[in-house]
Image: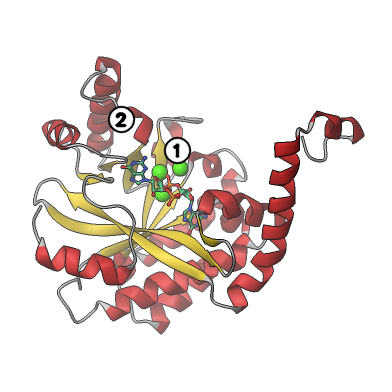
Amino acid sequence: AKGNGRNSYQFYTEGMLDQEVRRLELDKDLAKALEQDQFVLYLQPQLNLETMEVASAEALIRWNHPERGLIPPIEFIPLAEESGRITDIGRWVVMAACRQLAAWRNGPLSQIKIAINLSGRELDNEDLVDHIQRALTLYQVDPRQLEVELTEEIFIQNIEHNRNQLMRLHELGVHLAIDDFGVGYSSLAYLRDFPVDLLKIDRSFITNITERPDDAIITRAVTNLAHNLGVKVVAEGVESEEQLAFLKGLKCDFAQGYLISRPVEARVLEPLLQDNPQF
Ligand code: C2E
Ligand code: CA
Ligand code: CA
Ligand code: CA
């Protein structure tokens, strides 16, 4: 309701007002968060269902706020998108991911990939691809170890610009994934028109996949379609052994979810992967 004219404010309940105050305070604090190095990169492993080895990890940002503790992205990413601070946060994520890959280069995790999330607002920035290139060069990271996850919004707004940005990224060797696939706009044209390497099937299709035939049928059809186009498939939000076995049966390529691990800091992930090279 914010900003929709003077009358909208009368609909605020007390709780909403508290929320709004919290938002304004957080936005103010966001300005300091980067300088004071308060962001932390959490990583959630993605399991290759053929080899049962961890192939990659998704970078999920957390804000370690000095007073409020660990704040999840849902509370500050939308704010940062509104204020434009998302650009600097995204740049930090790119650097942090490449720094992590460099730190793992000479150990047992040298082949792992890291997937970062980019919003439409970040893709607007002309300098994004150059920044990613600089980060890869600085840390001497193989571009094929970096993946970028994009939500479907980027395929309907600014199409020409976004396509151009993604073509440039793809030419560097960076892999592109469509996030939350199946919810939202779900046009199949962007599978044809954009250089897509991976599809991440939204968690809402996976949660009940073993009980609801419709979810299983959709997941199977999307997986087959993707494979016929040379695109790999990741299932999001896998929480049970039954779901994992079911997805293996569908020939889904990768699984990610609490069953394998919650998002954790790199130093927590390292022993986890070294103790369980295979799940
Ligand atoms: P997403 O990209 O769809 O990320 C998946 C979310 O699902 C993550 O929430 C993850 O913790 C959660 N998740 C993973 N496995 C399971 C599971 O088995 N069950 C359930 N219930 N949830 C699971 P998180 O970390 O809170 O991130 C939320 C969203 O914030 C992300 O959704 C992404 O859109 C955004 N985000 C996170 N980090 C970044 C970032 O660095 N940049 C940008 N632009 N957005 C980010
Ligand atoms: Ca994602
Ligand atoms: Ca997702
Ligand atoms: Ca999402």
Picture layout, residue 270 above or below residue 58: below
Say which residue label 2 marks: 207
**4 or 95: which is nearer to us?**
4
- Is residue 195 visible in the rendered image? The answer is no
The amino acid type of the residue labelled 2 equals Thr
Q: Determine the image quadrant of residue 230.
A: top left
Q: Say which quarter of the image contains residue 251.
A: top left
Query: Looking at mark 2, is its residue's CB closer than 8 Å to ligand 1?
Result: yes
Residue furthest out toward the top = 213
Q: Mark 2 packing: few (<14 Cα in 10 Å), some, or many (20+)? A: some
The answer, for residue 198, to whether it is visible in the render is yes
Q: Is residue 242 above or below residue 174?
A: above
Q: Give the residue drawn at x 28%, y 36%.
A: 226
Kind of residue sitting beneath label 1: Tyr
Q: Give the secondary structure at mark 2.
A: loop
Ligand 3 within 8 Å of the CB at mark 1:
no
**Res. 173 mark:** none
User: Which label number is shown at residue 190?
Assistant: 1
In the image, 28 versus 139, the foreground residue is 28
Mark 1 or 2: in front is: 2
Q: Are marks 1 and 2 in contact (CB under 8 Å)?
A: no
Give the residue displayed 10% in from the left and 60% down from the top: 276
Q: Considering only vertical position in the picture, is 161 above or below 3?
A: below
- Image spot of residue 173 (x, y percent): 34, 64
Q: Specify whether 8 is left or right of 105.
A: right
The x and y percentages for residue 129 are 51, 66
Q: Quadrant of ligand 3?
A: top left
Disc 1, SS? helix
Q: CA distance from mark 1 to mark 2?
A: 26 Å
Upstream in the sequence, badge 1 or badge 2?
1
Q: Could you tell me which residue is drawn at 21 percent across and 49 percent down?
A: 260
